[in-house]
Amino acid sequence: MDKHKPISVRMNGKETLVKPNTNKETTWSTSSHQQAAALDKNFEPEDLIELEKTDRSDKDDDWFEIKSKKKRKIPSVFKLFLFAAISATLVGVTLGFIMLRMFAGIDDNDADQVNAIQTQQKENNGTSNESVDQATIAGNESVTIEGLDSFVIQAGVFSTKEKAEEWRQQYTDAGFPAMIWENNDEFRLFAGIYQSESSAEPLESAMIAENLDPYVRAWQTETMTIEASAEFDAWLDSFSDHWNDSITILTSEKNLSSIQSEWSEWMSNYPESDPQLGADLHVAGQQLVQSIENEDNAQLLQMDLLNLWKQVDNLGE
């Protein structure tokens, strides 16, 4: 080979001609510098990458590729189950808290009611004891008033006193006096009182003849107990005897002249120890005595006896 002939060298995929130098040191030195310069000038990074890729083509992973790790996903079924469990827990805790408050409130209410009842019982006991003490100090005692019964001519039952007064006036205008007896929010109109039903029938028929609508019925009052003095008890005890005798005498004799002295004596024995308790009864007794002295007719005397009966019944109110 001619040492001066250019030499062809292939570098980086390109063919390069290198001229020989007579001076070996200079030639090789110059050649090395030229080659380095040529390499630096003609260097293409893609060629190096291509070469590296070719050399590492047998490997699984690329050196320049970074694979990202995949995150594990929670299955939807587990998410649904977890959501249901949390929801059930929250609902259970909420309901439990509500029930606890309810039962706690009920217990508190029960305790309050028990305390209120106990307090009321203590107050009632105190009031009862106080009433008994006052009655004892005043010399009062429990007095039993026996109920009375008889037959009356009832002219009507009304819900208002005004209506009862209207019908009472109709009976009075027809010549039949009547009185109003208030009982349990009702207003009864009585136009006569007799010992028996048969003895009341003649007056009932006379009223019907005047286009009125009465009827005979039994009437009675209940036995009751009041607080009163012993003197009032004794005075009231004789009343029932005088009253029953007057009903019997009035049915047969049509007047009460024969029993006038008994009623006058009864009135004179009125106890001053209970002036307010029997005040209305005392006034009704005075009216009866005055009617007997005036020799009023039997129907007016019946009204006085009915009024006396009503005032005795009012003592229990």
Image (tube, helix red, strand yellow):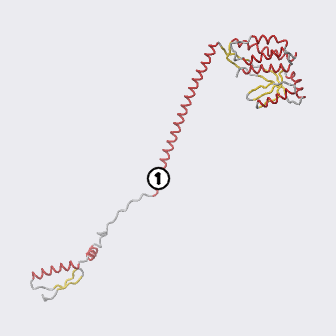
In percent of width and height, residue 237 lies at: 74, 13
In percent of width and height, residue 60 lies at: 31, 69
Lateral position of residue 81 relative to residue 183, left or right: left
User: Residue at position x 37%, y 62% from top?
Assistant: 70
In percent of width and height, residue 174 lies at: 87, 27
Quadrant housing residue 171: top right
Total numbered labels: 1
User: Residue at position x 60%, y 18% from top?
Assistant: 130
Foreground: 75 or 205?
Answer: 205
Lateral position of residue 121 relative to residue 5, left or right: right
Q: Quick check: 70 above or below 33?
A: above
Q: Amino acid at mark 1?
A: Phe
The N terminus lies in which quarter of the figure? bottom left
Q: Quick check: 22 above or below 244?
A: below
In percent of width and height, residue 9 lies at: 19, 83
Quadrant housing residue 198: top right
Lateral position of residue 94 relative to residue 135, left or right: left
Foreground: 243 or 91?
Answer: 243
Label 1 crowding class (10 Å Cα cut-off): few <14, some 14-19, many 20+? few
Foreground: 93 or 306?
Answer: 306
Q: Quick check: 70 above or below 94?
A: below
Check disc 1 and report the residue beneath it. Answer: 83
The C terminus lies in which quarter of the figure? top right
Quadrant housing residue 64: bottom left
Identify the secondary structure beneath mark 1: helix
User: Residue at position x 79%, y 14% from top?
Assistant: 242
